Image (tube, rainbow, N blue to C red):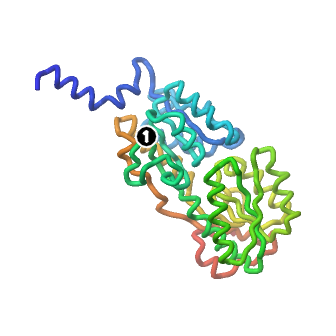
């Protein structure tokens, strides 16, 4: 191989990173998920993770949060703008955001902080070999839905009717409802779907559960609901309604019970994937990680306020009990 061929071969190996870093420009990380401007904990966690990998925003990387949105309908347009601006990596949170990004581009690397089933949702060929431009973490939120309903039934053995909070604008949440309906039949439970299409509907929709004669509620895993977790927990507390949630974030705001993966940790850890991609790795070759730990958290303070005694059989299985 002559000198010219050697140089060309080296450039080809470095192409993913070389193309991303334009002369005089820092690599740009575009963020895409549903966000509440009043709560920046996930954004801060991602920045912390990037710092741990040696990246300082404005110094050797640019983290662009201008594309965070407040509702599902805005995700597709935001993903299109990210693609048009040719960011180097897109970081998503939630299945619907990952789908929007994947639909907008098949070339820009997409790294998921969390999603439902990326194979079922069509953003990856498999977990071991994603095969396209998407990698990251899956929370398996849909697959955990059945377990949440089982736990709720054990916590409240006299419950017969359960309200399920979801958004029909998220296919993964609709799929979760189908799984819950199948599980409910085996548990002799009756479900009532309560649909939320926009953040402005949260309080009124939750208040409307009172008219359903529900004994308890289940909030599906949802980036929309996580963004507005404080409002949701407060609305249910006013109703004195026992609720099980799908995100650990609800344990921070007094949720009675939570069963799910620790997404906050994922926001920090995802920086490892971003770092690998900026250094030339291809998303197709980076396996999608499943949660290594799914935690059950029980809040006894909330249980006491609701006048509920949690069965000992449930408490002994809890990974964390808040007293």
- Residue count near mark 1 (Cα–Cα under 10 Å), binned few <14, some 14–19, many ≥20: many
Q: Is residue 164 left or right of residue 274?
A: right
Q: Where 167 falls versus 307 (above or below)? A: above
Q: Which residue lies furthest to the top in this view?
A: 24
The residue drawn where x is 57% and y is 39% is 100
Q: Which of 240 and 80 is in front in this view?
A: 80
Asked if residue 302 shows in the view, the reply is: no
How far from the left and from the top, in percent, is residue 228?
72, 48
Query: Which quadrant of the structure image shows residue 216?
Result: bottom right
- Residue holding disc 1: 133
The residue drawn where x is 69% and y is 75% is 153
Quadrant position of the C terminus in the picture: bottom right
How far from the left and from the top, in percent, is residue 258?
65, 64
The residue drawn where x is 44% and y is 46% is 135
Asked if residue 35 shows in the view, the reply is: yes
How far from the left and from the top, in percent, is residue 162?
76, 68
The residue drawn where x is 35% and y is 35% is 279
Q: Nearer the viewer, residue 163 or 253?
A: 163
Q: Which of 238 and 83 is in front in this view?
A: 83
Element carrying mark 1: loop
Q: Nearer the viewer, residue 259 or 184?
A: 184
Q: Where 189 falls versus 14 (above or below)? A: below
Q: Where 261 falls versus 130 (above or below)? A: below
């Amino acid at each position: 191989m002559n000198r010219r061929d050697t140089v060309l071969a080296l450039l080809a190996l470095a192409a993913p990173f070389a193309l991303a870093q334009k002369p005089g420009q820092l690599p740009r990380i575009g963020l895409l998920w549903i966000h509440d401007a009043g709560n920046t904990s996930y954004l801060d966690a991602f920045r912390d993770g990037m710092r741990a990998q040696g990246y300082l925003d404005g110094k050797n990387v640019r983290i662009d949060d201008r594309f965070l949105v407040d509702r599902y309908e805005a995700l597709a347009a935001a993903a299109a703008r990210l693609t048009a601006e040719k960011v180097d990596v897109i970081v998503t949170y939630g299945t619907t955001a990952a789908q929007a990004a994947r639909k907008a581009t098949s070339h820009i690397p997409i790294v998921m902080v969390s999603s439902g089933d990326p194979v079922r949702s069509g953003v990856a060929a498999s977990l071991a070999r994603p095969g396209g431009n998407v990698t990251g973490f899956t929370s398996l939120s849909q697959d955990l839905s059945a377990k949440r309903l089982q736990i709720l039934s054990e916590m409240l053995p006299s419950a017969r009717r359960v309200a399920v909070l979801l958004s029909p604008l998220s296919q993964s949440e609709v799929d979760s409802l189908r799984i819950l309906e199948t599980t409910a039949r085996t548990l002799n439970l009756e479900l009532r779907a309560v649909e939320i299409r926009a953040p402005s509907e949260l309080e009124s929709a939750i208040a409307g559960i009172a008219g359903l004669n529900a004994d308890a509620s289940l909030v599906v895993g949802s980036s929309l609901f996580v963004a507005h977790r404080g409002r949701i927990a407060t609305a249910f507390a006013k109703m004195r309604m026992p609720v099980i949630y799908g995100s650990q974030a609800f344990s921070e705001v007094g949720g009675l019970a939570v069963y799910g993966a620790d997404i906050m940790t994922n926001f920090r850890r995802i920086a490892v994937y971003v770092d690998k991609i900026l250094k030339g790795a291809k998303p197709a070759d980076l396996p999608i990680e499943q949660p290594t730990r799914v935690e059950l958290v029980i809040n006894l303070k909330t249980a006491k306020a609701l006048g509920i005694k949690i069965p000992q059989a449930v408490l002994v299985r809890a990974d964390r009990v808040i007293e």
